[in-house]
Image (cartoon, helix red, strand yellow):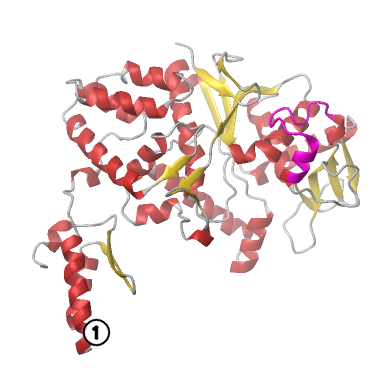
Amino acid sequence: MTIKLYNTKTRAKEDLAPINPDNVRMYVCGPTVYDRAHLGNARPAIVFDVLFRLLRHTYGADHVTYVRNFTDVDDKIIARAERDNKPISEITAETTQWYLDDMAAVGVMEPDHMPRATQFIPQMIAMIEDLIGKGHAYAAEGHVLFAVDSYKDYGALSGRSVDDMIAGARVEIAPYKRNPMDFVLWKPSDADTQGWDSPWGYGRPGWHIECSAMAYELLGEDFDIHGGGNDLMFPHHENEIAQSCCAHPEGGFAKIWLHNEMLQVEGKKMSKSLGNFFTVRDLLDQGIPGEVIRFVMLSTHYRKPMDWTEKKAKEAEATLRKWYAQANTAIDTSEPYVAVIAALRDDLNTSLALAELHQLSHADDTSALRASLQFLGLMGAETPKWATTPVVELTSYVESLSTLRETAMQTKDFSAVDAMKSALVAAGVEVRMSKAGVELVPGPDFDPSKLKDLL
């Protein structure tokens, strides 16, 4: 059965017709590794993980090549290293592993290739030299810039006018630019800043060239799918297309472009200023299982804004507990439910796939349910431990601790408060006390059996 995908470039759903069915190739823009992955970073990782699984199911695991990069040279990384007084290599090694651990916790498989930008500096320099030689780039004051005027189709992906693109990119009006839209391929570094020797002096690559160079080296001059968040459509993906098509006009770069929509939290854009900014690790440490995070993400189609809410997380946990109880009795002998696969083949309709699982849970085919959960990355070889742990209502413990706290405020004797708090912490519960009241949050090591004699 054919896979249909919405191609951002053509604004239409298209049949995926692989350039080479024996090697279906996909490139997805990965993270800039300077800190923990926030909840929004998890969405493209999960979306394209589902597509990776679908491609492997359809064409065979040996006939799919998936590349997702790490940006490990960036001004934010340099700033973080200066702030923490640590080598850049230490910062990027640590944060890269954080990302891999957190994505594994939400069921994301590792791609076939995970190139780091710093591993491909010679290839980037070679591509930049080629672009200069073909008249698509020029050197100026230690910089090399791509000449946007040299590529007639610039703007076709995002569909923006030049004025809109200038506003959207917040372009730097620099004296060495021939055109305000020209973007940096190489920029100078001072002696104390990360850099490499090049024909244009000591410096480092611009952001956009890395993906073009790595995609070419690992996938060739053209490949089937390029993905990422829609915040990357312009300028990053627009610039990738321009420099790649000019460097390798014999190819077409990516045939199909997929972009996932952004994430909100409780109906609002996630931001630190609003106090609704979460990393994946924050949620995991609060005791929200990775499977629950993944379920909530899959419950919304990738081309629609995704709203993370506490209510959705609780509903997802309840649903998964029910499904796991059913699937736990099954034997691993079945293929994923055909209706689930059909939903995914229609532009990755994960919300419909979950609806099909609801229908399947009412049937007697527990083997298909188990296989489908595993296919969607919602279940491993075994039922997760949290799903077999009884749900404990902590309201009575909140009320008891609040009462003890009120009494202690009057008597100035906090021994009973401290004792109950210590017992809760020993049971794996995070205790949060503030002027607003008492909040108890079960952690990943929560053991409700340790609470039975506390009240």
* Residue closest to the eye, 173 or 369: 173
Is residue 155 magenta-colored? yes
**In x, y percent, where is residue 430?**
29, 64
The quadrant in which residue 299 appears is top left
Residue furthest out toward the front = 267
In this rendering, would 207 be left or right of 378? Answer: right
* Residue closest to the eye, 409 or 428: 409
Whether residue 418 is visible here, answered yes or no, is no
Is residue 401 magenta-colored? no
The quarter of the image holding the C terminus is bottom left
Q: How many marks?
A: 1
The quadrant in which residue 366 appears is top left
**Pointer 1 local density, CA inside 10 Å: few below 14, some 14–19, many at least 20:** few
Q: Is residue 74 above or below residue 262?
A: below
**In x, y percent, where is residue 58?**
44, 17
Q: Is residue 51 above or below residue 320?
A: above
* Residue closest to the eye, 169 or 175: 169
Residue at the spot x=82%, y=41% of the render? 181
Whether residue 146 is visible here, answered yes or no, is yes
Residue at the spot x=77%, y=25% of the render? 248
In this rendering, would 77 be left or right of 193? Answer: left
Residue segment shown in magenta: 151-167
In this rendering, would 224 be left or right of 336? Answer: right
Residue identified by numbered label 1: 409
The quarter of the image holding the N terminus is top left
**In x, y percent, where is residue 49?**
46, 32
**In x, y percent, where is residue 190?**
80, 61
Question: Of the residues shown, which amino acid type is indicated by label 1?
Answer: Met
Residue at the spot x=42%, y=54% of the render? 281
> What secondary structure is found at the residue carrying circle 1?
helix
Residue furthest out toward the top = 1
